[in-house]
Image: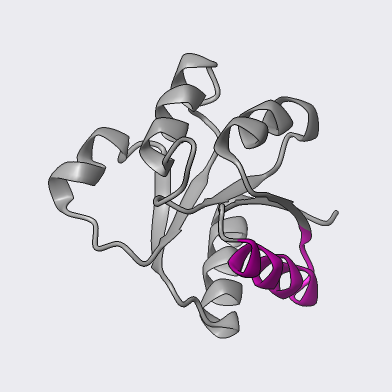
Amino acid sequence: MMKTVMVVDDDIPNLTVMGLLLKKIGYKAITINNGWDALDGIKDQKPDLVLLDLMMTPIDGWQFLDELRKAGLQGLPVMLFTAKYIRDEEIAPYKSDIILVLQKPVSLKELEASLHDFFKNKS
């Protein structure tokens, strides 16, 4: 069965590229350019994984993770992809929610290997 990956990023070109890359490597991609819309979409579309940018508006990635917890969805695996350097103290409160951090720009090879490893280990 094809795995579904939701990409949440307010940068439309990045969002479009990530959607195309995911489809190319065999995943169903849901692309959403707003954290609030993504939170609503998660309930209906139930992705297997969320690829989350940190630097977004109107809510950033950290706020998105807080809202996931408030909604009782903290078990949903999240992979960050960001150009921002993340300090240990920033990520510490979210360690149980974040499975991996990918630095932008993410190559096709890196994305494919990361997703393959995650889903292989999850099975």
Report the residue at 36% width, 37% height from top: 62
| Residue 117: image location, x then y, percent | 54, 66
Q: Nearer the viewer, residue 23 or 121?
A: 23
Q: Does 9 lie within the magenta span?
A: no
- Residue drawn 30% across the image and 41% down it: 95
The location of residue 3, given as percent across then percent down, is: 76, 54
Q: Which residues are magenta?
A: 12-28
Report the magenta stretch's main SS. Answer: helix
Most extreme residue toward the front is 58
The number of callouts visible is 0
Front residue (pair 101, 64): 64
* Residue under the point 60% across and 41% down: 34
Tell me what residue is drawn at x 85 percent, y 54 percent. 1
Q: Position of residue 47 (x, y in %)?
A: 70, 41
Residue 14 falls within the magenta-colored stretch:
yes
Tell whether 3 sits left or right of 104: right
**Height in image: 35 above or below 112?**
above
Up/down of 68 relative to 5, above or below = above
Residue 82 relative to residue 20: left or right: left
> Is 16 on the left or on the right of 79, as rendered?
right
Residue 18, quarter of picture: bottom right
| Scheme of colours in the image | one colour
Hey, which quadrant is residue 44 in on the image? top right
